[in-house]
Image (cartoon, grey):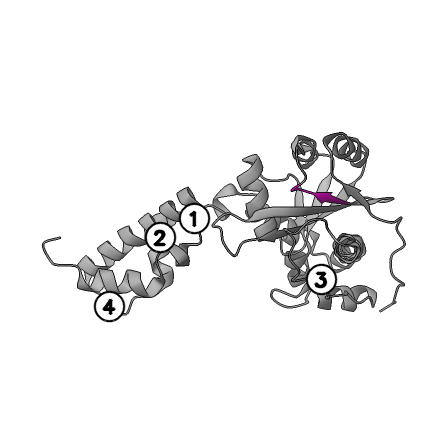
Amino acid sequence: MSRSPRPRFPDPVLITDSRALAELCERLAGERFVTVDTEFMRERTYWPELCVVQLAGEREVAVIDALAAGLDLAPLAALFDNPAVTKVFHAARQDLEIFLHIFGRLPNPLFDTQVAAMVAGFGDQVGYDGLVGSLTGGQIDKANRFSDWSARPLTAAQIAYAAADVTWLREVYTRLLARLAADGRADWVAQDMAALAQPTTYRPDPFTLWEKLRPRTGNRRMLAVLRALAAWRELEAQKIDIPRQRLLKDEALLEIAATLPSDA
């Protein structure tokens, strides 16, 4: 496989105001595809706190400070709605969950390089670092991956890291498309992307979540209680925006369901 040098892009632009974001999204509306990534925090909340959005077009890359005071993300929503621009992610599920929560709808059309890589023969849930290395010979600098993205101001190293992710993703996307076309598998990917575009993928029925607890019992009464408890926990955690495990741990749910009086 041919190796390529690091993609050459202008220095990333940090976007902190609504006008600059609107102008950026207007320019990117003329692209065939835009690569997208996010940085977020979720340790103390149910809903991810969006901190940064990275976008790369053919000639520019931008890092959007989603926590900037007064920033209106409406232009980003409009870009995501643009049917002429494919929005490209890697391992898109959490990113899409964020945008569905913020905008009430998913980017369309969208493409997930992790899903495409699986179809192309790279194995299940291939990591981004490995995919970049396999397809381009490039290497991702991981130093800022777990930094505090809610802290301000963003450091130069954080901005560079965020920009590099979407820069490499352009290379990954174009090479994956070529490989899929050569192997006659492009239609397979389209079927998988259709599932990603369904909002129900990211909004599971709270009354099915008890199944993930894997209770070691066939007692119908206990399972009915557990079903109701797990649904209550999920809806309450969403309402007050705290992690479900912080509200009530799995072990506690199972114990309550097992010990609840028979006349409760």
Q: Which amino acid type corresponds to the residue marked 3 in the rendered image?
A: Asn
Q: Secondary structure at mark 4?
A: loop
The structure residue drawn at horizontal position 33% and vertical position 57%, both measured from the top left corner, is 210
In the image: residue 209, left or right of residue 94: left
Q: Which residue is mark 2?
A: 208
The disc, 3 or 4, on the residue closer to the chain's N-terminal end is: 3
Q: Secondary structure at mark 3?
A: loop
Q: Which amino acid type corresponds to the residue marked 4 in the rendered image?
A: Thr
Q: Which residue is mark 3?
A: 144
* Boundaries of the magenta span: 63-67
Q: Is residue 36 above or below residue 80?
A: below
Q: Is residue 64 magenta?
A: yes
Q: Which residue is mark 4?
A: 217
The disc, 2 or 3, on the residue closer to the chain's N-terminal end is: 3
Q: Secondary structure at mark 1?
A: loop
Mark 4 neighbour class, 10 Å CA radius: few under 14, some 14 to 19, many 20 or more: few
- Say whether marks 2 and 1 touch (CB < 8 Å): yes
Residue 151 visible to an observer of this rendering = yes
User: x and y percent of residue 189 in the render?
Assistant: 65, 53
Q: CA distance from mark 4 to mark 1?
A: 23 Å
Q: Secondary structure at mark 2?
A: helix
The disc, 4 or 2, on the residue closer to the chain's N-terminal end is: 2
Q: How many marks?
A: 4
Q: CA distance from mark 2 to mark 1?
A: 8 Å
Q: Which residue is mark 1?
A: 204
In the image: residue 6, left or right of residue 150: right
The disc, 4 or 1, on the residue closer to the chain's N-terminal end is: 1
